[in-house]
Image (cartoon, rainbow, N blue to C red):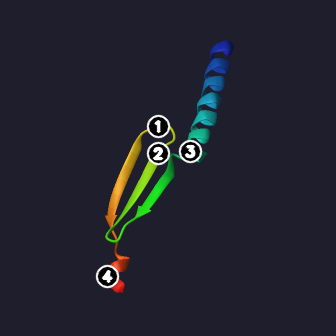
Amino acid sequence: MKNFKDFILKGLIIIAIVGFIYLIMPKYQVHTVKVDEDYVAITKINTITGEVSTNFKKNIWKRFE
């Protein structure tokens, strides 16, 4: 029974350490930002899966000029 408790305790410690590393590791990295007259394109890379996503947003600064 003592070996089983030690095994479970070590497993929980390993899970806690991996979870902590996952929390502090940055999940997204901004790769490029392109500014056009009307739009802003932001390309992000998910550092865990390697997935690349691009978001287009309308340039709101143009409205205030």
Which label number is shown at residue 63?
4
- Tell me if label 2 and label 1 are in contact, CB under 8 Å: yes
Q: Is residue 47 left or right of residue 12?
A: left
Mark 3 lies on a secondary structure that is helix
Which label number is shown at residue 50?
1
Earlier residue among tags 4 and 1: 1
**How many residues crowd around disc 1 within 10 Å: few (fewer than 14), some, or many (20 or more)?**
few
Mark 2 lies on a secondary structure that is strand
Say which quarter of the image contains residue 18: top right
Q: CA distance from mark 2 to mark 1?
A: 6 Å
Establish if 32 lies above or below 35.
Answer: above
Establish if 28 lies above or below 22.
Answer: below
Say which quarter of the image contains residue 9: top right
Q: Which sits in the foreground, 2 or 47?
A: 47
Residue located at (58% from left, 31% from top): 15
Comparing marks 3 and 4, which lies closer to the viewer? 4
Residue located at (64% from left, 18% from top): 7
Q: CA distance from mark 3 to mark 4?
A: 38 Å
Residue located at (37% from left, 67% from top): 36
Residue receiving disc 3: 23
